[in-house]
Image (tube, helix red, strand yellow):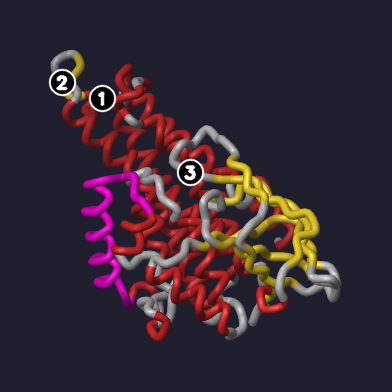
């Protein structure tokens, strides 16, 4: 079964997201919970919707389209995804139920260098962790003494906010220096932890696709109404060609992101190459978003460079997305090594 089979459901989900984000692009965690987005992937038995990553991707794209500030990436996309990839346990099920009900906000710490020694003491650091600041629980991916990846549930670690150019994102440095954890707080993965990186990269690619789509639509609308020399600027060949180039980039990015979402949602069971699909989507969509938003800035003329236009927010977010969870160069190296 493919994501296309749920096109009507996705359209409904998208319509609700557009309406909510139009009213307030700054979505707090309680609004995310009330909308049911936090528990999309949480099993129904634990109070969630029992949906898949394909539905989560729809929300990620709409959050990007609105350049919305929220804790969705780190607390719902990554944390819930990590919890679902762990072996069944009372702690895991309790956390999933708490997230779905809004009783706790959990943030996932991946991509760091954490180790768990024989005395169950956690040591390590991770930078630019989404939505870690203010989270009620942290899920830290660490390596135990056997060399296996484990998830460690902790309440208190050193979390230092890291200011970045993109003001719509909240990232922080998370550090631990021989922090003792309880035995029940060490959870085992049912599969492989690296798939968490795939989810993170594709979620950011979805966000970048939404950014690019929004700026393409805004630019075409502006070109149809803004007049110069007594005619709409959209009638000039240079503007037409620029908009056409933007459309090509968005169309290709949309196809690559769709395939990557499908691969991650099915875990490659549909025969797709998950690693390759993710690398292509992340590298192309994030670079294209920077190009499209940059061109939108230029085609809006002088007003595009003003603070009031809001285009700067899209450009800053697209630029940060480009480096978050793997730069385009890093993903392309992975593809080159394969072929």
Of pointers 3 and 2, the one earlier in the residue sequence:
3
Q: Secondary structure at mark 1?
A: loop
Q: In the rendered image, which quarter is residue 149 located in?
A: bottom right
**Residue at the image point whose x is 84% and y is 68% from the top:** 117
Q: Residue at x 35, y 77 (%)?
A: 49
Q: Which residues are magenta?
A: 5-28
Q: Position of residue 142 (x, y in %)?
A: 73, 65
Distance between mark 1 and mark 2 Cα atoms: 9 Å
In the picture, measured across the screen, residue 87 lies left or right of residue 261, that is right
From the viewer's perspective, is residue 314 above or below residue 126? above
Q: Nearer the viewer, mark 1 or mark 3?
A: 3
Residue 172 quadrant = top right
Near-viewer residue (251 or 27): 27
Side of 121 relative to 5 (left or right): right
Residue 275 in magenta stretch = no
In the rendered image, residue 338, in percent from the top left (x then y), is placed at 71, 62
Q: Residue at label 2?
A: 231
In the rendered image, which residue does mark 3 sit on?
A: 169
| Residue depicted at x 25% and y 65% | 11
- Dominant secondary structure of the residues highlighted in magenta in the image: helix
- Local packing at callout 3 (Cα closer than 10 Å; few below 14, some 14-19, many 20+) is many
10 Å neighbourhood of mark 1: few (<14), some, or many (≥20)? few
Q: Nearer the viewer, residue 143 or 268?
A: 143
Q: Is residue 75 left or right of residue 22?
A: right
The residue to which callout 1 is attached is: 236
Question: Crowding near pointer 2: few (<14 within 10 Å), some, many (20+)?
Answer: few
């Amino acid at each position: 079964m493919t994501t296309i089979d749920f096109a009507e459901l996705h359209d409904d989900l998208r319509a609700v997201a557009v309406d909510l984000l139009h009213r307030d692009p700054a979505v707090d965690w309680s609004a995310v919970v009330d909308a049911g987005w936090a528990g999309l992937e949480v099993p129904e038995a634990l109070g969630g919707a029992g949906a898949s990553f394909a539905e989560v991707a729809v929300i990620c794209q709409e959050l990007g389209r609105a350049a919305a500030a929220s804790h969705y990436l780190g607390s719902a996309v990554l944390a819930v995804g990590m919890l679902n990839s762990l072996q069944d346990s009372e702690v895991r099920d309790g956390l999933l139920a708490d997230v779905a009900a809004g009783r706790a906000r959990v943030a996932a710490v991946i991509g760091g260098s954490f180790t768990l020694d024989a005395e169950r003491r956690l040591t390590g650091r991770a930078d630019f962790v989404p939505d870690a600041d203010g989270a009620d629980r942290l899920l830290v991916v660490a390596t135990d003494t056997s060399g296996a990846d484990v998830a460690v549930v902790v309440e208190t670690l050193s979390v230092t906010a890291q200011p970045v150019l993109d003001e719509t994102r909240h990232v922080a440095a998370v550090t631990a220096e021989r922090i003792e954890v309880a035995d029940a707080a060490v959870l085992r993965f049912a599969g492989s932890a690296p798939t968490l990186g795939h989810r993170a990269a594709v979620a950011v690619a979805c966000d970048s696709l939404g950014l690019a789509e929004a700026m393409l639509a805004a630019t075409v609308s502006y070109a149809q109404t803004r007049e110069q020399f007594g005619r709409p600027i959209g009638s000039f060949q240079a503007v037409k060609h620029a908009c056409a180039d933007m459309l090509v980039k968005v169309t290709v990015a949309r196809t690559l992101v769709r395939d990557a979402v499908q691969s991650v949602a099915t875990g490659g069971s549909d025969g797709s190459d998950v690693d390759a699909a993710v690398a292509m989507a992340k590298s192309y969509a994030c670079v294209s978003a920077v190009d499209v938003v940059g061109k939108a800035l230029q085609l809006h003329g002088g007003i595009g460079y003003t603070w009031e236009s809001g285009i700067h927010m899209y450009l800053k977010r697209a630029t940060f997305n480009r480096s978050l969870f793997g730069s385009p160069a890093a993903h392309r190296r992975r593809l080159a090594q394969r072929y």
